[in-house]
Amino acid sequence: MIKKMKSKVFFLSTILLLLTVAAYPQIKIGVLGGVNFQNINGKDYQGDKLDHGLTLGFHAGANVNIPIAQDFYLQPGLLFTIKGSQNWGNGMTGTGDYTTKTKISYIELPINLLYRAQVGEGYILLGFGPYLAYGIGGNETTGDDKRPIKFKYQVRSLTELQDNAYYRAFDAGANIFFGYEIPAGIFLQLNTQLGLVEFQPTYDWMPDTEASYKNTGFGLSVGYRF
């Protein structure tokens, strides 16, 4: 129920964003979507470097170009995006080889500075800026075991991990993207993202942990600006 409510809030917020800016012809609306190749980097609970692999996700949403100077725009947006990683190794609470796939769903607010200049018949796109994100759901799958992801700052008991996986909901970092827009308004861009906020929870039974989990990744977007 909560997940459905958060999804409705996202879509209603997107519609409200589009309706709000529709009255200003100098502001251009864009819708976009694409694939993510995401990973979780950092250190594990013993302080060793994480050896996770890329996992496939996607993103979809909208943004607006607000002119602030010639060829420069402020570009806020609102996205639904899936991040995560794959992990191969031996379990913390068991033995034997396993593959764990982590998929975390976020509502994301990027606020980029965009340079959009005419090159040939179209426009070159170069942007960068911060993003804020909030987790709304997901799953962590190991073999046939699939646990829903819940969001907590602190996990107090080991027994809580039997039914759920836990992460902190808040994420933030930096975006960089490069692309090209043709005169018809269709654009293609390559996105990279570096998470700057640790989102692993603290565990009461491991007070001296050195864990540090951060989202990183890149992706490809296709969109239409009108």
Image: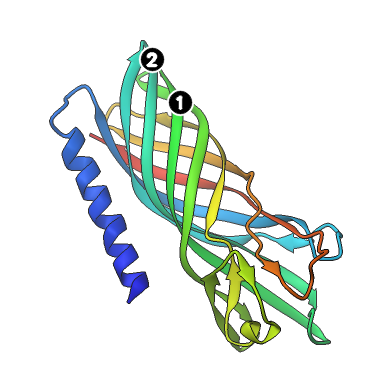
> Of residues 154 and 113, which is closer to you in this image?
154
Residue drawn at (72%, 69%), measured in percent from left and top?
87
* Among numbered discs 1 and 2, the one appearing first in the sequence: 2
Q: Which corner quadrant of the image does residue 125 belong to?
A: top left
Sort mark 1 into few (<14), some (14-19) or many (20+) by Cα contacts within 10 Å.
many
Residue under numbered circle 2: 71
Say which quadrant the N terminus sits in: bottom left
Say which quadrant the C terminus sits in: top left
Question: Callout 2, which amino acid?
Answer: Asp
Sort mark 2 into few (<14), some (14-19) or many (20+) by Cα contacts within 10 Å.
few
> Of residues 49 and 187, which is closer to you in this image?
49
Residue under numbered circle 1: 113
Q: Position of residue 221 (x, y in %)?
A: 44, 45
Residue drawn at (53%, 47%), measured in percent from left and top?
219
As drawn, 165 above or below 16: below
Regarding mark 2 in the picture, which secondary structure is present there? Answer: loop
As drawn, 27 above or below 52: above
Q: Position of residue 129 (x, y in %)?
A: 51, 32
Q: Is residue 42 left or right of residue 103?
A: right
Q: Is residue 148 left or right of residue 184?
A: right
Residue drawn at (44%, 49%), measured in percent from left and top?
108
